[in-house]
Image: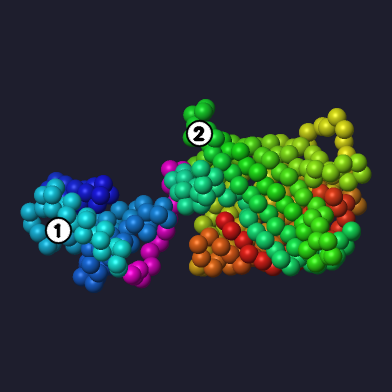
Amino acid sequence: MKKLIFSIFLFYGGFISGFADEFRGEIDEYSDELVAKFSAIELYQKAVEFEKSSNFKQALKYYKLSAQKSLKKSSDLSLQSVSNLEQSLKSELILSPKINLPPQTNKQSNSKSKINKNNQNLQENELFWGITAHQNNYFLPIAYSSYKGTHKDITSEFSISLKKLIASDIIGLNEDYYFAYTQLSWWDIYADSSPFYENNYQPEIYTQIPVDFYNFNHIRLGFLHDSNGKGELESRSWNRIYSSFELDFGKLSLTPRLWLRLPDNEDDNPAIVKYNGIIDLTAYYKLPSGSFIQSIFSNNLRFDKENKSSFELRYLHYIGDGFYIYLSGFSGYGYELVYYKKYQNRIGIGIAFR
């Protein structure tokens, strides 16, 4: 109700003060066509869609058009009539199908819109108690590996990755503080006893600071623990601090991340930095209908025969309600902690949730 009343008063006040010319200048060449062709409810629905996608300029435009259409029906709107109008719009929204309006340009260039976008994503992805998806949550019933180890070459794997906002704006930078937990499990499901042959546990704490500078979206600083919970020769564990930042180019985003391993009193895997690297680059490309392509490249930055790297390519095809058909391919080192020194090629298919 507040949105509709605000838009009507904004339009009406602008008309009284001589702001009508400027208002008409903001509405593009499709304005007359839109007002004539679509009802107030349809224009209002489109405004809500733009606001949900953080395109506030277009949202305001369509709120104004909706108000303009409504005001044409009555020259003497009172607050009560505005309330009745909104109730009518809400009722029609439930029954009205989605409509396709002429495509508009979606421009986001300031930190406020990026912050709102991030907060909106948190709300949309919320699962329970303020907990949201962190990385990809997936189950691959079929996953092939070129390195067998103690398992069959075809297994299954899954990942659970969640985060929780624990604090905000402590130092005045509009920053957020999160606790996250990711678990990766490999299941030898096609073996006789179907054992889980490897689990990797990754608790994490980090802060994310929004940035308004060219294509920078945010900076992230964090601490990450990674271990497999095993003992003796198969024990793997390491701690690291990291820094990353995201560059947003619309459909494409790039996130370089650099980390530093912290020393351990008992080092079960002294060569893990050599194989798992000290830097990675995540690329994320949005496709139509909510699908996307994601890639992760890591390297140890040793520019000699000791150079080691890995590359993973993921395709997520959106099927609705946050679920995706998930296809993943990997080549390199460090896919599983227990076999971090072993070079392997992998491919898997399954379903993911974000």
Up-down relation of residue 239 to residue 133 (above or below): above
Q: Relative to 89, is 339 on the left or the right?
A: right
The quarter of the picture where residue 143 lies is bottom right
What's the residue type where badge 1 is placed? Answer: Leu
Q: Nearer the viewer, residue 117 or 136?
A: 136
Residue 141 lies, in percent from the top left, at 71, 66
Q: Is the C-beta separation of discs 1 and 2 under 8 Å?
A: no
Q: Is residue 137 magenta?
A: no
What's the residue type where badge 2 is placed? Answer: Ser
The quarter of the picture where residue 145 lies is bottom right
From the viewer's perspective, is the residue at label 1 or at label 2 nearer?
2
**Residue drawn at 76 percent across, 37 percent down:** 239
Q: Which residue is mark 1?
A: 71
Q: Which residue is mark 2?
A: 168
Up-down relation of residue 140 to residue 109 (above or below): below
In this view, the residue farthest toward the left is 76
Residue 237 lies, in percent from the top left, at 81, 40
Classify mark 2: helix, strand or loop: strand
Q: Nearer the viewer, residue 103 or 4?
A: 4
**Residue drawn at 52 percent across, 50 percent down:** 127
Residue 227 lies, in percent from the top left, at 78, 43
Range drawn in magenta = 97-114
Q: Assess disc 2: are there few (<14), some (14-19) or many (≥20) residues with their C-alpha within 10 Å of its C-alpha.
A: some
Q: Relative to 119, is 31 on the left or the right?
A: left
Q: Assess disc 1: are there few (<14), some (14-19) or many (≥20) residues with their C-alpha within 10 Å of its C-alpha.
A: some
Q: Earlier in the sequence, mark 1 or mark 2?
A: 1
